[in-house]
Structure formats: C-alpha cells, structure tokens
Image (cartoon, helix red, strand yellow):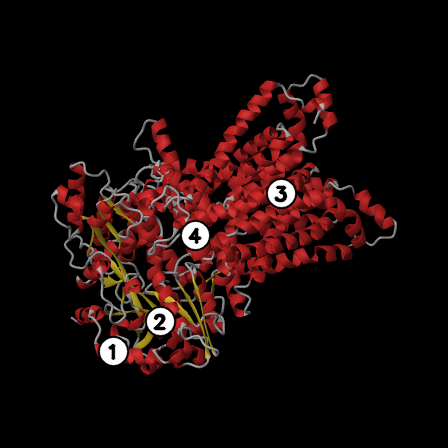
C-alpha cells in the first residue's frame, strides 16, 4: 500500500471520504431507521400523522408505558417461533452454498479448460436459462412436485435454488478459472495425475478467492429468496423471508407489521457478525482477483 | 322472497335443537374417528386458525391432523389437489377461490357426509351447486361503510346511506376545513380496485354478464355511472389512493385523517382496538351498511363467505376423517368471547358484536354475494388493471370500459369461455 | 480437455439445469402455443350463504373428456403471441390506421398492456444499468483509498441495500417516501410544495423506482469492481504516474480498460435482472403508474383463474427480449472465444 501509485493527495482523500460518507448514509440510514423503529409500536413506526413519532415514540408511550418496547421481538421470536424459520434458513443457505459451489466449480473448471465450440453455446444457453422469470419456473414445478410427493421439503427447495442459481455461478467461476494459468494443472497431468486429481490437488487449493466471492452471491440469493421458498415450502419448513411475508397481513386481515420489522432486524444481525468474521477472507478473496467477464 | 328468507335464516340466532345434535357429534372422544389423514390448506386468518385448532382436537394415534395456513393458498390449491392422492384433504376457500376447484372438478360433493355428520349445520351454511353440496361455509365478510360520528356531527350531515350522500358529506367536511381528504377506500390497482368496481357496478344494478353467456355487459350506461361515482369519490381521497390497500387505508383511518371509508368488515375489530389509534378516533368510529348508488336498492358491496371443501383425489376414509375433524372445528362450542370477535361467524350461536354491525346491515339490506362464476375472476382482474388510467384522469370512462372489455375478451378466449 | 472428461465435470451442473430449468422452459414454450379447450358450460342452480341463483358452471365431465383427447388444449400456433395481451398486432395496426398523428398513435399503443410494460421495462433497464455501473465503480475506487481498518465496516454497510430483505426493505422505504414519511416530508419542505406526493404522479413514481433500483443494485457492482481493482497491475500504474498522468487519466486510461471485462460482466447480469424488474413494483404498489413484463406474468398467475398460456407467452417474450438485449455482449464473447 506504500506504492507511489496508491499514495493520495489530501484533496483526493477528502473528496473520496466525503463521497463515501454520503453513500454510507444513503445505504445504511434506512437500516438504522428500521433498527430504531423496531422498538416502537406500529402506530409510531408507520405513522400517517407525523413521522417524528417514529423517533420519539409518542404512541409507544401511550400503548406500552415506555418509549421503547420489545413487543415486536417478543411476538416474532416467542409467539410466532421465528427461530424455526431461522434454523430452516440456516439449513437451506448452508446446503445451497455448498452444493452450488461444488457443482459450479466442477462445471466452471471444465468450461474454462475446454476449447471446443460447444463451450460457448453452453455458456449462452446458461444465460438464456437465467433469463427465465422465476415465477414461471416455480409455478411449473408445483404439479409434478405434488404428484411425486416432493413438495414442501427443504431438500427439494435446496436443489431448485441450486439449479436456478447455477447459470450465474457457472459464469462467474468460469471467468475466474480462466485467470488461473493452465500450466498449473497441465503440468500436474504431465506428472501423471488424472484430470480430476489435477483439479483436486492443484486447482482447489488456489481457487478459494473466486469461490468465496461467488459464494457470497449464492449466499445472498438463498438467504433472500422469496419466489421459490414461498411456494415450495410447507409451513413447518418455512424459511425466514416467507415467514416475514406472512406477518404482513392480507387484504382482509390486519398483519403484525412490527413482527416483520423486528424479524428483519434480527435477520440482518447475524449477517453483520458473519461479514465481520469473514471480512478478512472476503476482502482477501476479492483481493486475489476473483472475476473477469 | 326466497332470498329474504335465506337471509333471515343466515343471521338468525341458533335453535337449540341444532345445537345439541352438533355437540353430540363433536364431543365424543377424538371425535369418533379412528383412522385417517387430515391436511388442510387455507388462508392464515386468525378465524381459520381457530377452526383448525378445533379440528386438531381430533388428532389421535390413527388420525393425523396437519394444516398449511398461508396467504399463498390460492397459488397452491389447484396443483396440490390435482395430484393423486391430493396433498391436502381439504381446502378452505371463499366465493372466488372455490371457482378454480369447481372448474377443474377437484372437490367432492359432500351430501353423504353432511347427511351423516352435518346435522348441526344450518341450511344456509351449505354451498350448493347443481343440487350438490360442495362446501360448508362458516364465516362471512363484506366491505361496508365506516364513519366518524364526531366529524359527521361537526359537518352537520347525517350518516350517509347512498354514495351521493357520501359525496355530499365529503364536500361538507372539506368545505368546513375539517379534513383535506375526508374519504378513503381500498383503491390499489389490481385486485382491490377490481373489487371496488365489482361492488359499485353491483350497486348500480345490472348483470355484469349477458344472461346465460360469458360475454360482458358492462360497457353501457350502468358501467359509466359506476365509473363516474368511483371517480367522484376519489376526488375526495388522498392523491395516493391508487396505492391504498387495506393496510394503508386502515392506517390512514387510525391516524384520524379520514371520516368515511368503505372497508372490510374483518378490519373493523383491529381498527377499533386500543392499538394504533387515539381514543377520540376509536370511540367515534361507527359501522353501517354499504351505501346504495344511483337510485338503486342493492347496497354497493358484495358478500363473501369462507368455508371448507373436501378434495376429490383422496380416499373416502380420509374424506370422512377430514369432514368430521373440520366439523369439530366449526361446532358452536368453539365460539367464546375471544373467538367470537375474530369474524362474522355463520356458526349457530354467534352473537354479533358492534364490529359485525356493518356486515349484517349490508346483508339485511339485500346485498348480493360475490358471484361464483367460472369467468368472474377474469373480469375482476381486467377491471383492476385497466381502471387506474381513468381514475387518474388520463382517459374517458368509455375508453376505460372498452379497455376492460378488450382485456376480458382476450383472457376469456384463452380460457375457452369465448370463441 | 477430452469430451469424456468434460462431460463428467459438467454433469452435476448440467443435470440440475436440465431438470429444473430446461425442461420447464420446454413445457412453457409448448404452453405458449396452446390455449385451453372451449369450456363446456351449463346453467345450474347455485346456493350460497346469502341466496340462490341460476348461473353458468363448467361441465366437468365434458371438459375432462376433451382433455383426455388432447391434454395440452387447443393448438393455436403463435396467436397467443399476437393477441391483445401480448404483441397486439391487430390493435397496433388499427391504431396506425386511425390515429390522428404520431403522438396519438403512441398514446394508443401505450394503452395496450404489453407495450406499456415494455416502455417502463426498457426505460428502467437502460437508466438503471449504467447508473449502477457508474455508482458501483465510484464506490469501489473510493473504498480502495481507505485504510484497511476502515474497509471492513464500510464494505458491510455498503452491502446493506443488497442484504436487507427487499420485501420489508421496500415496505419501509415505501413508508419513508409517503407524503407524511420522513423522506416525503423532507422533499416537500425542500421543494416548498406541500402537495408533492411521490406516489401520486407517474413521473415521480418512475424516478423513485429508478433511484431504488440503483440503490439496491449498486452493492453488487461494487463487490465485483472492488475485486477487480485489487488486481490492477501496480507497475502499470506507477509507470503511468512517472509519465505524468493525472489521477483522472490513470483511472481513464489504465484502470477502466483493465476492468472492462468486469464491466461487461456486470452489464450482462444487470441488463438481465433489470429487464425482469419485479419486486420494487410490487412493494411500492406502483401498478397504476408502472408495470413490467414480469408484473404481467405475475398478474396472469396471481388470480383465481390463472392464465397459464398467457403467462407462458409473456415469459417466452421476456427470454426473447433478454436475448436481443444481450446480442452485442454475446457477439463480443463469441469473438473473445474464437481468439482463444
């Protein structure tokens, strides 16, 4: 970092800092607003009378006797057993990331090492696959899944999410593997390794940076998915996002919007810990030069 | 006349004879069923959860009772019941969501089961099609008027009974400077707006379809009257009205920004509870029947029911177990102080509280049920999507009506209802 | 790599995509070429809670017989693609013949659901995509100037718009931009216009959706560009500096060309995602002012009487639209590929 090219003049530093502060306010303000508001009652946080109620908690004081209330959290976690959804999300996310990356790494590696023309067409077809609106795909799954008794299970949802995410994973990892010099695995094969052994012992140790970046996106996809999980999971296997959607109520019934708000804040907290914990890996993963179109 | 009689029966308080026979059917240990699978798909209303809790009492070693109560039940029901055996042994439906199940023949006639186990049911709870009982209704709902007594008094207007009076009241409230936007309603583009159109058109009076055909007949004077009234109402609403679903409209009400609105009966309870609003607003909030419009006599609203059906693609044993379990969920004993306030129950022994007043007033004034037509939903969707331009003043009523007609025709052709 | 090895490596991935994407696409394609059989309806008496009426009902037995003979329905060729709900060729031709002038013609076209959706979809795609790339790139360059202790938290907060579940995130934003919400009220104060409402005017709703789109997707572009920035060869930068290049010139002539492939990648993904814009339109209740192709599909599916054939047709048109949008990128990739 001491290289002359990266040394900055104070003016540049100031401009970059000012820009970042503005961006961070834009990016993080809604979240902090939500964090603060999650300790209020709905009448304050979604006040149609005066938005400052969300800050001072006028109704919260009237309805609960204090300026802050944990009712949203209590309702979501104790009454509605949100922790079940958290566990289910944990399972889904874990397996989606692992399987996506395994499939994607094998496939992406093959695509990057084969020079035949069908590789290009496979990549193109993957793009077309990615263009398909998810809602159409999911509604097509329903009947066969019900028919074959596959509907409602976590495993079915995991496989579907892996498949839907596969085109993106393939593209990203394919570009990444192209940046790993071919000499590496080819020399291993000259030494008598099979292709798979070369992949296993030579490529796997150096592929982590790219895999971690791709994994970040797989993670977010599985974590935030609504279209697939809401229609393919039964009530007891529900993940967080459909559960939160369930709190919002419908045309004829009032929902528990504050449960949803509290749940969202709780759902974001582990990510904060996760990002801080994996920060070194993520940053270094990125550092090693992950993606290339 | 027949209608009036049925209506009277619908909301009459229970006869004791019916009550006792129901109780004997339900109070046996484990409901008198020994084997079977009960799995119910339905919306996640608290009232439906109450019914399911009652049904779950029948679970025993041989009987499994599970349910999936979710907002997405409509998206799942056709696929889930088409599979053989069906994933769910019962689907809890409303007037509109029973239609796809009927169209595809996915639910079974209940005559035998009702004869065997349904002695406690009132005749009007039985949804009958072509002489066959297809569903058992247990709760009702409708959109009706909600008004602020204090504001109407300050403005010096009586409780409106027609939409013309609603407009006059809104004008008076606005001119006195009491409120900027005295009216509200569920006018969100899509299903909500479509529902408002169906309500208003029903009030103007006139069939939405040509008799005995799937052809629309809304592109006429009645349609124009309905549209113009909707537009007049929206001119007294918050300019964001096209984004207002029930949640938004209820929030406006609780914040004290609105004096009159057309709202779901099921929302009356939550609006008048002690959460989200000030005591002044809550104590002045009153319910009354849906208004009539354009000199018509039918209230401009549609009545809704929720009831249970039994799947066709399941064994008779499961069907029987499911029916008995659900009957246990809708027996009069499930009604207590807490559950009574959850809905307008059709169950014997239900004593309506003040929040049910609007639905009852509308029904007693002769409101008609939302149609169970196989192609009714297509009109609903077309209207919900095509009306927003008109309400924003971007096109004429005639153009809006012909747009609805064109959209409906395209959809109905695809579904095979029109050539 | 020999075909055989290639096959085994690609198999798991290909199998997953084949089963869960390719097969459904084939069935969707088939569906788009069919409509349902003519319904056999008859008049029956129906009684509900409130009254009895005579009404039409579908005759299940007769219908079932039709479907036993031809399970897919009636083959109609491409006519689903050309009906009013999609490309509306008849209506467009009629508008062309009867319109008083070009603007009248366009307003007639805009009245057709497909073209109305297309107008917003294309505007969204072509406005949001470049802005996402520019904003993401700027953030990446700025974050790169930070000391390493600051980078971690800054990266986390930058990712927040992408992390917070859009379902609830946009619900809260939707409230904030309400005329009585914090952002809406601030805007009213800023523009000194107490009637300003972002939700009531089509133009403002569009702008709001664009802003949300950029806000939500910028973190994605940021992550990719930030990754790329770490690999910019330092010696090239240094020699550029020795040659007297200003900071801007270094970015313009060294960093941007080096990151060009990444920009193509981000553009590819963003074009595709933005063309399928869906969630913000639903969460912001924007149906009156803006619809998109995905919204049309959703509306066809999300009703009691589902229009599966129509939804299938719109889905195929979406795929076609994405293919057309991506053609320039694809040609570029093809050239790169052949150079290898």
Q: Which residue is mark 4?
A: A74
Residue in the image at 34% along x and 78% along y: B27
The numbered mark 2 sits on a residue in which chain? B
Q: Pointer 4 and pointer 3: residues touching (CB < 8 Å)?
A: no
Say whether residue B92 is visible: yes
Q: Which residue is mark 3?
A: A277
Q: Position of residue C153 (x, y in %)?
A: 58, 36
| In-front residue for pair B258/C23 | B258
Q: Position of residue B33 (x, y in %)?
A: 41, 81
Mark 4: few, some, or many residues within 10 Å (few <14, many ≥20)?
some
Q: Which residue is mark 2?
A: B329
Q: Pointer 1 and pointer 4: residues touching (CB < 8 Å)?
A: no
Farthest residue, direction front: A65
Q: On the image, which quarter does residue B51 sit in?
A: bottom left
Q: Position of residue C209 (x, y in %)?
A: 44, 39
State the CA–CA distance, disc 2 to disc 4: 28 Å
User: In terms of secondary structure, where does tag 4 sit?
Assistant: helix
Say whether residue C324 is visible: no
Q: Nearer the viewer, mark 4 or mark 3?
A: 4
| In-front residue for pair C25/B146 | B146
The numbered mark 4 sits on a residue in which chain? A
State the CA–CA distance, disc 2 to disc 1: 16 Å
Mark 1: few, some, or many residues within 10 Å (few <14, many ≥20)?
some
User: In terms of secondary structure, where does tag 2 sit?
Assistant: helix
State the CA–CA distance, disc 3 to disc 1: 65 Å
Mark 2: few, some, or many residues within 10 Å (few <14, many ≥20)?
many
């Amino acid at each position: 970092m001491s290289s002359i090219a990266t040394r900055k003049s104070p003016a540049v530093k100031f401009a970059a800092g000012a820009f970042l502060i503005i961006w961070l306010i834009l990016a993080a303000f809604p979240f902090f607003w939500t964090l603060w508001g999650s300790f209020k009652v709905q009448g304050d946080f979604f006040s149609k009378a005066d938005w400052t109620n969300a800050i001072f908690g006028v109704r919260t004081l009237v309805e609960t006797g204090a300026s802050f209330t944990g009712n949203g959290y209590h309702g979501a976690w104790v009454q509605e057993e949100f922790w079940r959804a958290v566990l289910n999300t944990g399972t889904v996310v874990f397996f989606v990331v692992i399987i996506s990356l395994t499939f994607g790494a094998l496939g992406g590696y093959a695509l990057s090492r084969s020079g035949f023309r069908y590789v290009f067409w496979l990549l193109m077809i993957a793009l077309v696959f990615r263009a398909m609106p998810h809602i159409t795909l999911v509604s097509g799954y329903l009947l066969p899944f019900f028919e074959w008794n596959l509907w409602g299970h976590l495993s079915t949802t995991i496989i579907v999410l892996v498949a839907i995410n596969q085109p993106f994973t393939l593209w990203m990892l394919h570009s990444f593997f192209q940046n790993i010099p071919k000499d590496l695995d080819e020399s291993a094969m000259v030494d008598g390794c099979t292709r798979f052994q070369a992949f296993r012992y030579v490529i796997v140790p150096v592929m982590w940076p790219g895999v971690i970046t791709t994994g970040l996106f797989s993670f977010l996809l599985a974590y935030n998915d609504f279209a697939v999980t809401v229609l393919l999971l039964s009530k007891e296997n529900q993940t967080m996002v459909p559960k939160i959607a369930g709190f919002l109520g419908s045309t004829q019934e009032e929902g528990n919007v504050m449960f949803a708000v509290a749940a969202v804040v709780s759902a974001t907290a582990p990510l904060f810990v996760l990002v801080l914990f994996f920060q070194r890996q993520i940053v270094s993963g990125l550092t090693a030069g992950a993606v290339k179109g | 006349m027949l209608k009036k009689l049925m209506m009277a029966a619908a909301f009459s308080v229970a006869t004791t004879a019916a009550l006792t026979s129901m109780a004997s059917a339900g109070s046996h240990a484990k409901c008198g069923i020994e084997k079977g699978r009960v799995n119910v798909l339905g919306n996640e209303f608290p009232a439906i959860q109450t019914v399911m809790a009652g049904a779950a009492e029948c679970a025993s070693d041989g009987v499994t009772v599970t349910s999936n109560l979710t907002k997405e039940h409509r998206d799942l029901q056709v696929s889930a019941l088409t599979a053989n055996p069906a994933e769910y042994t019962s689907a809890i439906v409303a007037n509109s969501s029973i239609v796809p199940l009927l169209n595809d023949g996915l639910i079974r006639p209940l005559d035998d089961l009702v004869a065997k186990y349904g002695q406690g049911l009132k005749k009007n709870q039985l949804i009958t099609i072509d002489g066959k009982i297809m569903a058992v209704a247990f709760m009702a709902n409708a959109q009706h008027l909600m008004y602020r007594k204090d504001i109407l008094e300050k403005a010096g207007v009586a409780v409106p009974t027609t939409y013309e009076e609603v407009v006059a009241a809104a004008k008076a409230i606005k001119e006195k400077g009491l409120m900027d936007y005295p009216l509200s309603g569920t006018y969100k583009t899509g299903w909500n707006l479509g529902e408002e159109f169906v309500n208003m058109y029903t009030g103007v009076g006139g069939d939405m379809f040509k008799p005995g055909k799937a052809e629309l007949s809304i592109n006429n004077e009645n349609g124009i009257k309905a549209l113009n009234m909707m537009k007049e109402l929206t001119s007294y609403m918050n300019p964001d009205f096209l984004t207002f679903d029930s949640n938004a409209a209820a929030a406006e009400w609780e914040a004290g920004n609105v004096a009159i609105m057309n709202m779901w009966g099921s929302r009356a309870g939550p609006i008048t509870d002690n959460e989200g609003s000030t005591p002044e607003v809550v104590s002045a909030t009153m319910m009354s029947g849906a208004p009539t419009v354009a000199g018509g006599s039918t209230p401009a609203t549609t009545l809704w029911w929720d009831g249970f059906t039994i799947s066709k693609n399941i064994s008779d044993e499961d069907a029987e177990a499911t029916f008995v379990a659900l009957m246990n969920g809708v027996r009069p004993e499930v009604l207590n102080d807490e559950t009574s306030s959850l809905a307008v129950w059709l169950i014997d022994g239900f004593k309506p509280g003040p929040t049910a007043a609007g639905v009852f007033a509308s029904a007693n004034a002769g409101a008609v049920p939302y149609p169970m037509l196989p192609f009714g939903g297509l009109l609903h969707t077309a209207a919900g999507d095509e009306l927003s331009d008109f309400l924003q003043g971007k096109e004429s009523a005639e153009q809006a009506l012909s747009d609805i007609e064109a959209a409906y025709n395209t959809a109905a052709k695809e579904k095979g209802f029109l050539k | 790599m020999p075909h055989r090895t290639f096959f085994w490596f690609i198999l798991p991935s290909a199998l997953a995509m084949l089963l869960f994407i390719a097969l459904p696409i084939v069935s969707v394609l088939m569906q788009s070429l069919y409509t349902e059989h003519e319904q056999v309806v008859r008049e029956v008496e129906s009684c509900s809670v409130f009254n009895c009426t005579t009404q039409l009902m579908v005759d299940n037995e007769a219908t079932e017989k039709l479907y036993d003979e031809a399970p897919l329905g009636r083959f109609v060729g491409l006519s689903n693609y050309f009906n009013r709900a999609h490309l509306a060729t008849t209506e467009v031709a009629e508008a062309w013949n009867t319109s008083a002038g070009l603007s009248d013609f366009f307003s007639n076209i805009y009245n057709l659901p497909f073209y109305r959706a297309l107008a917003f979809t294309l505007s969204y795609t072509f406005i949001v995509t470049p802005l996402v790339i520019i904003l993401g790139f700027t953030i990446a360059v700025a974050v790169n100037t930070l000391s390493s202790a600051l980078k971690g938290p800054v990266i986390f907060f930058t990712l927040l718009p992408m992390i917070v579940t859009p379902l609830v995130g946009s619900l809260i934003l939707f409230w904030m931009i309400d005329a009585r919400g914090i952002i809406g009220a601030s805007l009213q104060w800023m523009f000194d216009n107490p009637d300003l409402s972002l939700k009531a005017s089509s133009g403002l709703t569009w702008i709001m959706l664009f802003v949300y789109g950029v806000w939500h997707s910028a973190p994605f572009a940021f992550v990719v560009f930030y990754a790329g920035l770490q690999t910019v060869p330092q010696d090239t930068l240094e020699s550029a500096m020795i040659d007297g290049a200003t900071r801007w010139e270094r970015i313009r002539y060294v960093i941007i060309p080096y990151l060009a492939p990444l920009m193509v990648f981000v553009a590819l993904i963003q074009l595709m995602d933005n063309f399928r814009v869906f969630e913000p339109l639903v969460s912001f209740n924007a149906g009156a002012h803006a619809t998109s192709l995905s919204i049309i599909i959703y509306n066809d599916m999300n009703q009691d009487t589902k229009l599966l054939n129509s939804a299938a047709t719109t889905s195929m048109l979406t795929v076609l639209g994405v293919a057309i949008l991506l053609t320039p990128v694809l040609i570029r990739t093809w050239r790169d590929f052949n150079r290898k």
